[in-house]
Amino acid sequence: EDQVTQSPEALRLQEGESSSLNCSYTVSGLRGLFWYRQDPGKGPEFLFTLYSAGEEKEKERLKATLTKKESFLHITAPKPEDSATYLCAVQAKAGNMLTFGGGTRLMVKP
Amino acid sequence: GAVVSQHPSWVICKSGTSVKIECRSLDFQATTMFWYRQFPKQSLMLMATSNEGSKATYEQGVEKDKFLINHASLTLSTLTVTSAHPEDSSFYICSALKGDRGIYEQYFGPGTRLTVT
């Protein structure tokens, strides 16, 4: 059974204080690992897809990396508008379904 | 781009009535769409996979007679909550699968808040 665990559950940062969110996974053949951002009362917003260990992708202050067991979402010099819940999900080669982690709730204080 | 819309964004209905939620992929065709349910401060729970032109596949524990799914076209899937009860109150989110050259990514709608009184 595919499993995704995200840590920490909640993270409070001061504006400008860089940090990383962790996503550990077990999957029977990884097709892709996905990162989404979700604001309260809204649907998840697509951020990145990573397909193989060693792959990295960047978007503004966010950088996602992937190893064979985990992925990190690095946030550099965060701003209050980066406050949201960040979701990690894996897609196995055997299908198109996503298995989601519990999310990390990020709060950035000015 | 990959834009998915949902309608309505919120709905209040009385217990015992049925409610239909629409999910549309606006700028791409999606043979597969997914329906999720999300409770406050929890992650997304997959309810069913909707395939255009065929029956939906429901996850274990999801009543297919209560949550009717129809995927009649490549851009539209609907979820009907039949005989709704207060415990069906939740945030329902759909996603559409966009595939291109072997890469498949899910794009989500904005969600529908259902409140059953």
Image: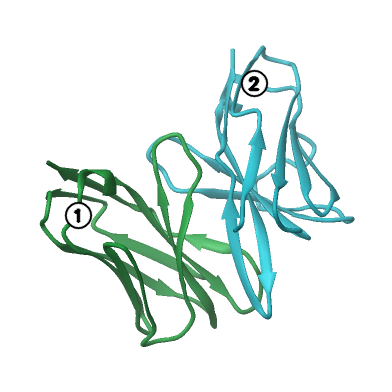
Chain colours: A green, B cyan
Q: Chain of mark 2?
A: B
Report whether A102 appears left or right of B73: left
Same chain, labels 1 and 2? no
Helix, strand or loop under label 1: loop
Whether A40 is drawn above or below B29: the answer is above
Instruction: Identify the amino acid type marked 1.
Output: Pro
Residue drawn at x 60%, y 58% is B1
Closer to the camera in the image, A9 or B86: A9
Query: Residue beneath label 1, please?
Result: A78
Of the residues shown, which amino acid type is indicated by label 2? His
Residue located 41% across and 65% down the image: A4
> Which class describes the residues within 10 Å of circle 1: few (<14), some (14-19), or many (20+)?
many
Kindly identify the residue that appears in the image at 49 percent across and 80 percent down.
A51
User: Which of pointers 1 and 2 indicates the residue nearer the eye?
Assistant: 1
Residue B89 screen position, x and y as percent:
56, 26
- Residue drawn at (26%, 52%) of the image: A9
Where is residue A101 drawn, in percent x and y?
41, 59
Q: Identify the residue position indicated by label 2 in the image.
A: B85
Expressed as whole percent of the image width and height from the top left, the position of residue B15 reads 67, 14
Q: How far, Cα to Cα, is label 1 from label 2?
A: 42 Å
Q: Is residue B90 above or below residue A86?
A: above
Label 2: which secondary element: loop
Q: Residues within 10 Å of mark 2 (few under 14, many from 20)?
A: some
Give the left or right position of residue A12, taking residue B47 as reference. left
Q: Please say if A55 is above or below A1.
A: below
Indicate whether A97 appears above or below B92.
below
Q: Which image quarter is the C terminus of chain A in? A: top left
User: Callout 1: residue from which chain?
Assistant: A
Residue A36, image quadrant = bottom left
Quarter of the image where one finds residue A39: top left
What x and y, as percent, mark residue A65? 33, 77
Q: Is residue A82 left or right of residue B24?
A: left
